[in-house]
Image (tube, rainbow, N blue to C red):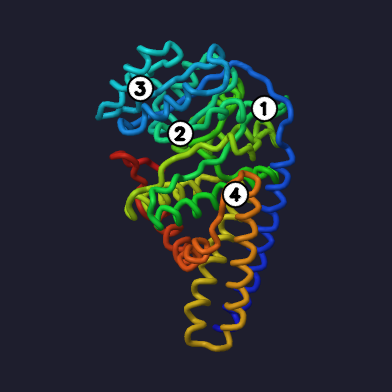
């Protein structure tokens, strides 16, 4: 058994390190594609909100404070069956600024979707402009966010994603969460740079309305994930998806305040993965999961079998080295800071965390704000 475990670990560790090298190459390509020219088309900004009374006002205010010409913006806030005061707060803001349009769930019945895809589809139907930007109701954007994202729409670009950074809540746990979430952003950007988009940053992306309608939005299969529209757009125009590596394009969101909320969010993210139909995408995800699973098993066995220890120690060393290097490269492009101390602590939990959350994400029902989302 030990020789077989050693061989599997060596094979999948090599594949994982090659994957990280490819991500670094993709980051460089994404950064090199940064646009030099600025243009100011009319834009529609869609915010889907469900029970966000604590955050919706701050979110919309950050959008209203854009450096972008105010006459070129419309803000469509879709209330997704909120049971708190979210809708009333949106109405109050809309009464003060004509750029804000409130769309309520009463008109969602004809769309026959659930959750965020339903809200976004309804928002697109009400949008009047070609460039549509999307963010979440619990997010805050910088004053140059619209300009930064819009600048990514070159002639052949049909979709632009931007980074999301989880704001620290003052605890060490929130710092570790932010580091883990930033790792997802880095991998997403790298894959887009390689023209192999696999993950969609649902709180910060934009697309051409005409393309959305051409590909029938989320389609007739009712996939409840934003990755669905990304896949359709990329299939329609291969290479047309870009990732903004501009610091101004960052959207900020709060980190989960509890361990339960953290795992709930990560399990929801992980549940997206089975809906990928591309063979290469499934192959990548399977390879990554098998590496972490074999590495965890080998690390446990190494406590009892001395012959495994040199290989396991070597894999730990190069994993630390290559992952930290990749994070630092992404952080440098986006002008973020990575703490090596926090990274080391996070590494202690990284392998079992991936194995456990990856499994639970496929087994447990996906719940979000009192709603169970069908797979």
Quadrant including the N terminus: bottom right
Quadrant including the C terminus: top left
For marks 4 and 3, the one nearer the N-term is 3
Residue 73 image label: none
Q: Residues within 10 Å of mark 3 (few under 14, many from 20)?
A: few
The quarter of the displayed image where residue 80 is located:
top left
Is residue 219 in view from this perspective?
no
For marks 2 and 1, the one nearer the N-term is 2
The residue closer to the viewer here, 168 or 179, is 168
Q: Are marks 2 and 1 in contact (CB under 8 Å)?
A: no
Q: Measured along the vertical axis of the image, is residue 229 above or below residue 106?
A: below
Q: Dot 4 lies on which element?
A: helix
Is residue 131 in view from this perspective?
yes
Residue 153 image label: 1
Q: Residues within 10 Å of mark 1 (few under 14, many from 20)?
A: many
Q: Are marks 4 and 3 in contact (CB under 8 Å)?
A: no
Real-space CA distance between mark 2 and mark 3, rounded to the nearest whole angstrom: 30 Å
Q: Residues within 10 Å of mark 2 (few under 14, many from 20)?
A: many
Q: Residue at x 49, y 50 (%)?
A: 181
Q: Are marks 3 and 1 in contact (CB under 8 Å)?
A: no
Real-space CA distance between mark 3 and mark 1, rounded to the nearest whole angstrom: 33 Å
Q: Nearer the viewer, mark 2 or mark 1?
A: 2
Total number of numbered labels? 4
Residue 140 image label: 2
Real-space CA distance between mark 1 and mark 4, rounded to the nearest whole angstrom: 21 Å
Real-space CA distance between mark 2 and mark 1, rounded to the nearest whole angstrom: 22 Å
For marks 2 and 4, the one nearer the N-term is 2
Q: Which residue is mark 3?
A: 109
Real-space CA distance between mark 4 and mark 3, rounded to the nearest whole angstrom: 37 Å
Q: Which residue is mark 4?
A: 186
């Amino acid at each position: 058994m030990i020789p077989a475990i050693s061989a599997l670990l060596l094979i999948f560790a090599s594949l994982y390190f090659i994957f990280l090298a490819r991500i670094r190459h993709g980051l460089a390509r994404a950064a090199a594609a940064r646009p030099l020219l600025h243009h100011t088309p009319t834009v529609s900004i869609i915010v889907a909100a469900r029970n966000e009374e604590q955050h919706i006002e701050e979110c919309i205010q950050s959008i209203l404070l854009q450096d972008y010409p105010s006459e070129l913006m419309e803000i469509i806030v879709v209330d997704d069956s909120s049971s708190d005061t979210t809708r009333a707060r949106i109405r109050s803001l809309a009464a003060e600024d004509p750029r804000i349009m409130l769309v309520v769930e009463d008109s969602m019945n004809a769309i026959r979707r659930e959750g965020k895809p339903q809200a976004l589809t309804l928002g697109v139907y009400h949008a009047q402009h070609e460039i549509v930007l999307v963010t979440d109701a619990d997010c805050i954007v910088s004053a140059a966010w619209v300009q930064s994202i819009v600048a990514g729409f070159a002639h052949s670009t049909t979709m632009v994603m931007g980074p999301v950074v989880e704001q620290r809540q003052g605890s060490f746990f929130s710092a570790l969460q932010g580091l883990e979430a930033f790792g997802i952003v880095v991998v997403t950007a790298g894959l887009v740079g390689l023209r192999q988009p696999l993950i969609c940053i649902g709180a910060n992306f934009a697309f051409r309305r005409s393309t959305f309608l051409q590909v029938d939005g989320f389609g007739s299969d009712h996939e409840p994930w934003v990755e669905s529209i990304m896949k359709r757009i990329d299939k329609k125009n291969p290479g047309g998806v870009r990732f903004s590596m501009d610091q101004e394009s960052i959207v900020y969101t709060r980190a989960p305040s509890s361990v339960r909320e953290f795992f709930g969010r990560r399990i929801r993210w992980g549940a997206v993965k089975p809906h990928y139909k591309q063979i290469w995408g499934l192959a990548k995800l399977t390879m990554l999961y098998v590496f972490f699973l074999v590495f965890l098993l080998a690390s446990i066995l190494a406590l009892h079998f001395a012959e495994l220890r040199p290989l396991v120690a070597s894999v730990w060393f190069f994993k630390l080295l290559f992952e930290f290097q990749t994070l630092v490269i992404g952080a440098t492009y986006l002008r973020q800071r990575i703490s090596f101390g926090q990274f080391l602590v996070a590494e202690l939990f990284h392998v079992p965390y991936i194995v456990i959350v990856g499994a639970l994400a496929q087994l447990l029902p996906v719940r979000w704000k009192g709603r169970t989302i069908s797979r």
